[in-house]
Amino acid sequence: MSVAELKERHAAAIEAVNDLRERLKQRRQQLLDADGHKLHSFSLLYYLAGYARSLGRSQVTFGPTDLVCCRTLQGHTGKVYSLDWTPERDRIVSASQDGRLIVWNAQTSQKTHAIKLPCAWVMTCAFSPTGQSVACGGLDGMCSIFNLNSATDRDGNLPVSVTLNGHKGYVSCCQYVPDEDIHIITSSGDQTCVLWDITTGLRTTVFGGEFQSGHTADVLSVSINGTNSRVFVSGSCDGTARLWDTRVASRAMRTFQGHEGDVNTLKFFPDGNRFGTGSDDGTCRLFDIRNGHQLQVYYQQHGDKEVPLVTSIAFSISGRLLFAGYSNGDCYVWDTLLARVVLNLGSVKNSHENRISCLGLSADGSSLCTGSWDTNLKIWAFGGHRKVI
Amino acid sequence: MPPPKEVAGFPSKENDEDQQYSFAVEYTGPPVTYDIPRAVPINVEKIPVAAVVSKVPLSNTELHIPVVPPILAPDRNKFSKELLLQPTVSPTSVIAFEERVSEDTNNCLLSGELSSYESGELAELIINNDSSSRGLAAVCSVSNEHSSKIDSCDSFDKSRGSSSRARISNDDDLNQADWGSNESVLSLDYPSSRVSSLKTGDCNNESNGDVRRPQVVTFRDIESEDGLDEDFSQDEVQAQVVRVKREPQTKGKKGSCYRCFKGNRFTEKEVCIVCDAKYCSNCVLRAMGSMPEGRKCVTCIGFPIDELKRGGLGKCSRMLKRLLNDLEVRQIMKAEKFCEANQLPPEYIFVNGQALSYEELAILQSCPNPPKKLKPGNYWYDKVSGLWGKEGQKPSKIISPHLNVGGSLRPDASNGNTQVFINGREITKVELRMLQLAGVQVAGNPHFWVNEDGSYQEEGQRNTKGYIWGKAGTKLVCAVLSLPVPSKSSNSCEEQLKSMTSRSVPDYLEQRTLQKILLVGSTGSGSSTIFKQAKILYKDVPFSEDERENIKLTIQTNVYGYLGILLEGRERFEEESLAEMRKRISSKETEPEAGSSDGSDSKTIYSIGPRLKSFSDWLLKTMVSGNLEAIFPAATREYAPLVEELWKHAAIQETYNRRNELEMLPSVASYYLERVDEILKTDYEPSDLDILYAEGVTSSNGLACVDFSFPQSSPDENIDTAEQHDSLLRYQLIRVQARGFGENCKWLEMFEDVGMVIFCVSLSDYDQYSADGTNKMLLSKKFFETIVTHPTFEQMDFLLILNKFDIFEEKVERVPLTRCEWFDDFHPLISRHRTNTNSNSINNNPTLGQLGFHYVAVKFKRLYSSLTGRKLYVSHVKGLEPNSVDAALKFAREILKWDEERINFSLSEHSFYSTEASSFSH
């Protein structure tokens, strides 16, 4: 094969690729067109639920004791803003506006650590995969890492072990890259997400910012794919969610439109092929990362009242249930398949008295922890004796 | 047993049932003088049906239902009401308690176990003559209205039987025995607080004349009866405060764990500091949960502790140490000691006949010489000498004098009868003896003034007659007579005052005394200057070493930046003048002067030599690439001489003279550029003023906060109460910059708890334009609108600071205010009458600057009231002048104070400790 021939074939291949790309673009455009949009999204919206029903799937039902509040973690004096579970042990870290991180033992509801933060305006916290350290970030624009094993200073405060400095805005969310204690991904009000190397304290990769495909407003949340830790999604005030590959910093792999408000929170579906979002428009949505389409909308009518914002979401281990916290103190348990509310934890007795700001499922999926502006955290779990089928 | 006569209103329905159903004993005691409480006929409709109970069959052996009981919320009133599903009140609710209190006036003593009073039937009336339980005069047990529903339940019957047996035998274990067997779901859910206060005299004083019996008695455990403090109960006679005493909710046999009912009195147990419930090591963690307020049952969280246990606060037991790790134990103990619910309730402490407030108690407890082991009760306090004692008794201690707590001292405070007075108090005989032994002349019933140092003088005379505690022997005498002597620390008054101002506020008070002020401003509004100014004004050490080092680097980088702007300007000017020159040459109209000075070889006054040129090019290149910060501070030593040379060069100076045309160059640049040689030295140390002028010092992370308190206005002035509280009041100034915080202001909701917002706008911005061509004033206006209308700040007070008033005053003379379209209707009236001399016009008419300020202020006020319907506070500030900033921040303080007063004004007295904000107002 001569060089000229190779070149020719190369050119042809490039042309073919470009052609395909163009057609893809056209097709997508067509789907999203004003006319087609309604129709198509309509069919997509009800596809999942309708298909499930046609298969005769019945709705998940909850008995009165299936999900009860079995622990109340009291100790914060300010609004709880964020919480995270350890992957293996039953410990929780929570961040509150009183300027403290508290590490709880969820079984005994004891506090094991109370960390006074240099900056009280903390927005997020995370447990490292090994459970050795916790990270937090807030309005100071820094992500601080605390090693739980380090010795306390004279005043009984845990010293900051690493400070990740480099964001130009507040740090809104942070999550450790699973299976390693040395990488963490943060999202910030400066419209970027950053992958950090904790050992050096330097930025490894910056996602967004000056690049065209980045977010155009504050990034509020990140979630790393549980099955492929190189992929993560971010949700932003620009109403979009974006999918990133940590190896490709230059552009987002996909942009997910659909929300009519800030995307406050998002979480990967357990299978890693989908993710859920929660937004200021009061809806939760389910997107597929493979085709970039929206699969489902979870929205509860609220009459003419103000629509409560979705503050935080979490999926059950199977993915059948979606827990969503709302700004009015509701916490709905959605049936992801049929898009119906199974239970409202906000109306259960002993529930929170204020906005539910964060929630998280333990690693084994046995219990749900909710944090609220009423300064308490509550742990919900299966409370009755029922035959396990 | 036939039903007793007293319960005549016993419903017929009950009578139908059977004889065995009667669970009352006939009254056999001495004739009673008081009214017998009558039972209210039962109303079947009103019987609350507890669904939970009726579903689960109760058996004698099964005490737990197979449902994990959810942990009770602290707000149990609400909960129990919900459970009842009836308008009847639970025994734990406040309403019931009040009712019971009112009932007490009818001399009826009820102990409501498991019962709601209203619908309950009076079934049993026992007068307990046993003198071993002094406090108990009578026990009126009200049976549970549920009995008609669940009468088929064996256990209930049985327990009833046992309870009557127990009562007949008049056992000490009256309560433990019967309620242990009467365990039911309901008793799990209703922690019965058997609250009863009664007047003893009414009940059984005939039968045993116990004189020392307290008049207000809290119904307590027999076990804890032994610990009854004599003076404690004495004090309560006059303190007409009915205190809620919580009782443990379940009781097993005596000495067993309250939760698992196992073990005996010798097993190690942890005691709840509220209700005295005891738990074994297996149960304590489950029963007490995370112990956010120390060792309290989960249900007791939020309730005041048992005063008898105050001494044990923060003292850890061995059991806890074994169960929990060190850190947890320390945290729990700290919480126990310092959490608010466990603090001594100030309203139970009377000083000179006046109940204390939170602040007074704080003053009392945090003074250098506080009364030890303060318990609820009545005290007298001699403010002049610091003598302190229980009402009606001799002094017990000398505490710090001059504390402003309680009312004024009464002459009969210590119940003396010697006709000798000290500071207006008639002293006791013991004191008189002491005075005599100390050599004080006490003949003729003198009235003494005694100061805190022991110096005394007769009333109305100036000369000090001597020192009471001056002699060595006096202290011995005092010790013998058990009278107090002043401690060493209270010797000098001044020292005390000093220590009072510098002392730390108790932990639990910190929160209520910290007032947060949020300082917001868009870029270039000078909010950082105000922040720095506040730091310099109110902090002893405004900037730490590290901060100063960072600031130094920032300043040096800034200087290079300014220089770069100058060089850029120079290039532009050079090109311009060259072009002009060429034009002139080409048009052959060369003027002689210009030609001679510039020369003909394309050299202008803006030209520099090749060496400087290369440096300048390099500097500009680095600036464009944005590496200025990375390179420069490090390379300062190398370039400093070059920069100096450059600065002194005529071309740069010429450019500098035209700095008004360089829009990028900030006005502060000249401050630094004129001292460029000094600043670029490696050993340069920025002065406070340098720091004040510096840009970008605090904006590195967008948020900065400083805690401060306003210093007392003048140290000579006598410190009155208001001042004292001022020194206690701490403020936190939080400064956030709009840049990097996005337009959505998601972060604003974090500042919900701030007391007020200071919004900073630069007055001189009216002719400035941002990069995209919008007027900066309009940008500020837009930002102002966003912040003001943010739901978080719905009821917030706003103070608008119009900053850079000095620049504005100067600028408004040159550039009309109407340059900004928002201000296009600014037509100052005085402009034509103004004389040329500015100094003259200050006195009679306001200057244009002042008029402009008022105009802008009104613009913002109108905007604010149209958006929120409230009043906007406005102040003008010259950010670089300390006095101006000080005045503005003090203005902010006044607004905060006024706010508190307004709250106090609208709320009544009793809300004093329910509303946090009102508790620190004067």
Image (cartoon, coloured by chain):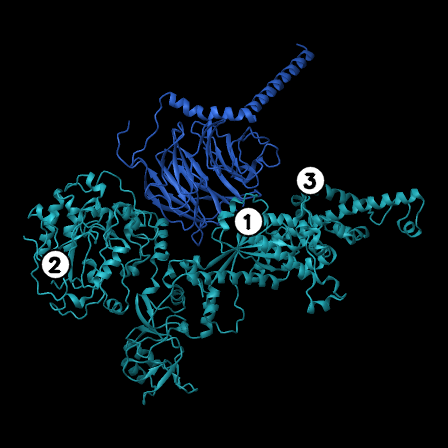
Chain colours: A blue, B cyan
Question: How far apart in space, not on screen, are marks 3 and 2 (Cα)?
Answer: 94 Å
Q: Earlier in the sequence, mark 3 or mark 2?
A: 2
Q: Is residue A227 positioned above or below A20 on the image?
A: below
User: Taking B657 as reference, is B499 above or below it?
Assistant: below
* Mark 1 vs 3, N-terminal side: 3
Label 3 neighbour load within 10 Å: few <14, some 14-19, many 20+ = few
Residue A171 image position (x, y, % from top left): 52, 42
Q: Which mark is residue B625?
A: 3
Chain to which the residue tagged by mark 3 belongs: B
Q: Position of residue B845 (x, y in %)?
A: 69, 66
- Amino acid bearing label 1: Ile
- Quadrant where the N terminus of chain A is found in the figure: top right
- Chain letter of disc 1? B
User: Where residue B596 sits in the image (x, y, percent)?
Assistant: 92, 51
Image quarter for residue B310? bottom left
Alpha carbon distance from label 2 to label 1: 68 Å
Viewer-side residue, B662 vs B774: B774
Relative depth, front residue between B382 and A35: A35
Chain of the residue on which disc 2 is drawn: B
Q: Nearer the viewer, mark 3 or mark 2?
A: 2
Q: Are marks 3 and 2 in contact (CB under 8 Å)?
A: no
* Residue at numbered disc 2: B126
Report which residue position mark 1 lands on.
B787
Q: Disc 3 residue type?
A: Ser
Can residue B785 be spotted in the picture? yes
The label shown at residue B340 is none
**Structural crowding at the residue carrying mark 2, measured as other residues with C-alpha within 10 Å and reported as few (<14), some (14–19) or many (≥20):** some
Q: Earlier in the sequence, mark 2 or mark 1?
A: 2
Secondary element under disc 2, as helix, strand or loop, is strand
| Residue B526 image offset from top left, x and y in percent | 62, 54
Amino acid, disc 2:
Ile
